[in-house]
Image (spheres, coloured by chain):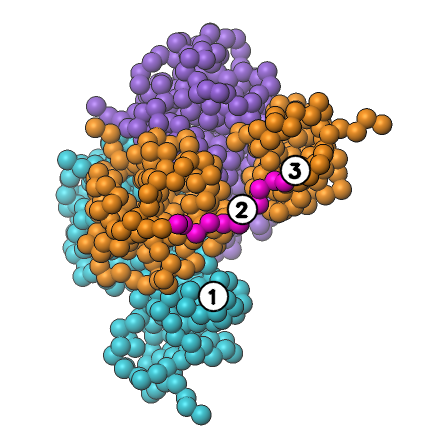
Chain colours: A orange, B cyan, C purple
Amino acid sequence: MSRPLVTLLTDFGTGSPYVAEMKGVLLSIHSDLQIVDISHAIPPQDIRSAALTWGQVAPSFPAQTIHVCVVDPGVGTDRRLVGLQCGGQTFLGPDNGIFDGILQRWPASEQWELTERRFWREPVSSTFHGRDILAPVAAHCAEGIPLEQFGEPCGGLVRLNWPFPRVTGERIEGECQRIDSFGNVISNIPRSLLDELDWPEWEVLILDRRVTRIVRTYGEGQPGELVALFGSQDMLEIALVASSAARELQAELGTLISVVPSSRA
Amino acid sequence: MSRPLVTLLTDFGTGSPYVAEMKGVLLSIHSDLQIVDISHAIPPQDIRSAALTWGQVAPSFPAQTIHVCVVDPGVGTDRRLVGLQCGGQTFLGPDNGIFDGILQRWPASEQWELTERRFWREPVSSTFHGRDILAPVAAHCAEGIPLEQFGEPCGGLVRLNWPFPRVTGERIEGECQRIDSFGNVISNIPRSLLDELDWPEWEVLILDRRVTRIVRTYGEGQPGELVALFGSQDMLEIALVASSAARELQAELGTLISVVPSSRA
Amino acid sequence: MSRPLVTLLTDFGTGSPYVAEMKGVLLSIHSDLQIVDISHAIPPQDIRSAALTWGQVAPSFPAQTIHVCVVDPGVGTDRRLVGLQCGGQTFLGPDNGIFDGILQRWPASEQWELTERRFWREPVSSTFHGRDILAPVAAHCAEGIPLEQFGEPCGGLVRLNWPFPRVTGERIEGECQRIDSFGNVISNIPRSLLDELDWPEWEVLILDRRVTRIVRTYGEGQPGELVALFGSQDMLEIALVASSAARELQAELGTLISVVPSSRA
């Protein structure tokens, strides 16, 4: 039988003792867990970044994985802690919008508010529910206890005001949604949208630059050339070959990115 | 039977190849170990930070965990390498003060100086005892070999000059002991001390600010408000709601933090 | 039977969701893998740094370890993905020079170009072969499938123009090859070269400084003193006791480091 898999996603910072405390609690309950760090480098309290990360990585994980996210500015207030199943996997965390990324990929299952104190660590602090509630719930979940035993079915989750790209006439208007460690500027414009519009040729506008070189991969342009391509999540991104597009363009999260049919002058 | 658990705490830096070398040595001896990274982001040679981290995280780990710390500015000199048992767990590292945090939580067990070369990796370098001595000792320890077989009983450990809070008249004087990734300013003043003094109301003085709003959790104040609360380790901390108190206050490790009964003017 | 060991070395950045995606793919195929992070802090597209890291850490890992490196600026172009065996371990990655460090330690085995699509994840993106090809190949490799089943034998690997130290008359000329998190300036001059020359006494020249204090370990000098020693990889390094030599000297990768017999004036 394979070892249950628990992943952790937090804004505690890489190397934070808070992460180690959660792992200690998990392994105290079930020493045979396989724990995978998704990331602890989410910017402090950045719920949208956490939601995007879960949406990006969860599809690569096997069924029955238990994912825990602790990006939880409302810890100890009346915000709910919830659990739900999506795509055959279990997701646990505060109901503040962090589930939005996975809910865009998979239909929502039933949801449970985590209210059953008998699974919690005692005493429960008012500032660290990741350690005192979510970690023990995840460990017991990994034993095969079904989600409904951890609490009550509950209503609609908090959703984020997610910036979807808009199509207005002959123009797609999107924005920068993520910048990776290479400085690639990743938009919220999916390949499927351009497939649908089926323009014979198109180009990308960002800040005061026009990117006309549409490539298949980073190494196709010349070093120093700005290119546009669909990245590994099938989202449109702008790259600077062998360098950082974000630095060159001074792009940030939220920077406008448009796509228009190519002008033939 | 569960897999033995070994944790690592170092100042090598996240992603350092020195950490990977230690893991390779551990897994070469005992491929079934579960290795947990406590942190590799301890500031270089910061013994006190390592001691605090061990003191914070060890209580969350299960009995029989083997903890290894390599914050070791004296490597290769005549400083001793020691092993001891505290709270049912085993701690291995250089005798330079790193054990001080756990020794404040648990009574000291007998201690052994690690002198038995037959458990070491050969040849032993003079600059990396983490890889050449501590990793192999930890791996053999995880097989169940008792600590006394690794060396000789030895006398008192090096202790740090730890800054405990002082109570003088109607004033507690403490200091900033840790700043977390959210910028929360964590003092060395435990909840138990305030419980004991039993002042009807109190406030916190830090730099030139007076913090009168005492809350239960971060989300209780208004965004931008300075609040004081007891964190997840039951130590008094100062937080700036939805932001970084350390940045706002320009607080640092060692910054004075006082608590006084509330003045009613 | 022990769990197969897979290591990951990338330039994705610590906490990158790309790393998590690779782990998800690995664990989806073979949930019992032990995954060890070598480092994800390789500077973007720095092939030489990746090659050095593999060369440094692989000798500490057990036989049969499967190492995966994704520092891959040419992803999706016609650069090859290859696998080879060295020192009883398996190495997988793009053929761009990353194998150079291990090839300096161990004789090259036969090499295979990874061409067998039946082991790949479908569809294969053009920008993330780490997730879509290398991770599934590594997971299947860990099941014991021999390397030759993953592709075709192939010819010589891309090699780096590696800066070996030169001996000219009574002078060794080397350079800074790595700077660790302590600021130790690590050269490409091995202890064996100085053993061979067998100079009665020698000193080190770096930038405009002369380092005459040759020690066995960091703690042997006075705080603030510049010392030279052989580090844990038996390479000559320059250290500043209790501080950072790199910062003090303003040394960088490539900074010239010479060794000459001691002058007796």
Q: Residues within 10 Å of mark 2 (few under 14, many from 20)?
A: few
* Chain for numbered disc 1: B
Residue occupying image coordinates x 40% and y 22%: C136
- Residue C229: x percent and y percent? 47, 41
- Badge 2 vs badge 1, beta-carbon distance below 8 Å: no
- Image side of residue C134 versus residue A144, left or right: right
- Residue C215: x percent and y percent? 45, 44
Please determine if labels 2 and 3 lie on a single subunit: yes
How many labels were placed on the picture? 3
Q: Would you name the residue on which mark 1 appears?
A: B241
- Badge 2 vs badge 3, beta-carbon distance below 8 Å: no
Asked if one can make out residue C21 in the rendered structure from this viewpoint, the answer is: yes
Which comes before the other along the chain, label 2 or label 3? 2
Q: Would you name the residue on which mark 3 appears?
A: A167
Which marked residue is nearer to the observer: mark 2 or mark 3?
Answer: 3
Which mark is on residue A162?
2
Residue bounds of the magenta highlight: A156-167
Along the line of sight, which residue is nearer the eye, B211 or C216? B211
Residue B14 falls inside the magenta stretch: no
Q: Secondary structure at mark 3?
A: strand
Residue occupying image coordinates x 53% and y 64%: B247
- Residue B27: x percent and y percent? 29, 32
Real-space Cα separation, disc 2 to disc 1, in angstroms:
24 Å
- Magenta stretch: helix, strand or loop mostly: loop
